[in-house]
Image: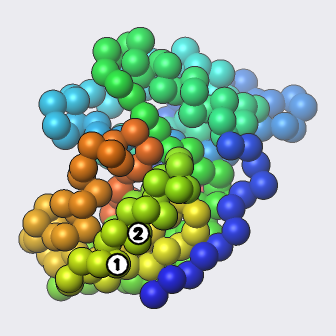
């Protein structure tokens, strides 16, 4: 199954929140920032420490959600600026090779709505792999199509949805493929339920 939505025209969540004075010019927008590899593989970051680091960035308000590293923020920065600013902050503060994926509220909502799989199921988990490099994500999708027992849907240039059996995520063919080092710097995966929580947090900013 292959469904492609057009990308954003923009360049390039109970949550714990912080807020600065409002934007008098009305130019602020809300974005979701997804950190790759946090609290797995030896990269351990406490959310309290993450919030302290983010408080130094030019965000009008922000919220962190769950230990997997999810940020909802309101800022005048564009998506590309957010990506470079957050990555630099993480590298300088926590000393690891940090990579993030940034989506606007509208684009995140579009991807959630396009996902054909249920957010809750007793048999399967629904995941969405997000990517900052469309070519790399397209390659991942193509390779996964050649594997047995892979159910996936391309949601857009920056997202692929896929299924894994409950209790078998790490052993699933797609999970093993996407864990390869080639995809480390440009992709990150979230449960569909997590994306919904981030979307709802953005609406509260």
The x, y position of residue 134, in whole percent, is 55, 56
| Picture residue at 44% right of the left edge, 44% below the top | 186
SS at badge 1: helix
Q: Is residue 139 visible?
A: yes
| Picture residue at 72% right of the left edge, 58% below the top | 8
Out of 69 and 159, give the one closest to the viewer. Answer: 159
For the rendered model, the colour scheme is: rainbow
The x, y position of residue 154, in whole percent, is 49, 74
Q: Indicate left or right for 111 with 52 as reference.
A: right
| Picture residue at 86% right of the left edge, 38% below the top | 26
Q: For mark 2, does the 10 Å Cα neighbourhood hold few (<14), some (14 to 19), or many (20 or more) residues? A: many
The answer to whether marks 1 and 2 mark residues whose Cβ atoms lie closer than 8 Å is yes
Numbered circle sitting on residue 145: 1
Out of 9 and 167, give the one closest to the viewer. Answer: 9
Q: State the image quarter where residue 97 is shown.
A: top left
Reading the image, the residue beneath label 2 is 141
Q: CA distance from mark 1 to mark 2?
A: 6 Å
Q: Is residue 196 visible?
A: no
SS at badge 2: helix
Out of 189 and 39, give the one closest to the viewer. Answer: 189
Q: State the image quarter where residue 51 is shown.
A: top left
Q: Indicate left or right for 32 with 123 as reference.
A: right
Quarter of the image that includes the C terminus: top right
Numbered circle sitting on residue 165: none
């Amino acid at each position: 199954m292959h469904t492609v939505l057009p990308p954003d025209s923009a360049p390039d969540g109970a949550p714990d929140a912080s807020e600065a004075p409002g934007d008098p010019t009305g130019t602020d927008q809300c974005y979701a920032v997804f950190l790759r590899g946090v609290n797995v593989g030896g990269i351990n970051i406490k959310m309290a420490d993450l919030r302290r680091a983010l408080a130094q960035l030019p965000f009008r308000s922000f919220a962190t959600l769950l230990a997997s590293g999810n940020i909802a923020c309101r800022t005048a920065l564009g998506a590309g600026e957010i990506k470079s600013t957050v990555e630099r902050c993480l590298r300088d503060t926590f000393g690891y090779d940090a990579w993030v994926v940034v989506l606007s509220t509208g684009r995140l909502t579009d991807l959630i709505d396009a996902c054909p799989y249920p957010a809750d199921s007793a048999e399967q988990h629904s995941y969405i792999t997000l990517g900052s490099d469309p070519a790399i994500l397209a390659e991942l999708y193509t390779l996964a199509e050649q594997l047995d027992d892979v159910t996936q849907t391309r949601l857009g240039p920056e997202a692929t949805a896929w299924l894994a059996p409950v209790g078998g995520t790490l052993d699933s063919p797609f999970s093993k493929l996407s864990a390869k080092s080639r995809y480390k710097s440009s992709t990150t995966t979230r449960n569909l339920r997590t994306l919904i929580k981030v979307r709802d947090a953005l609406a509260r900013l």
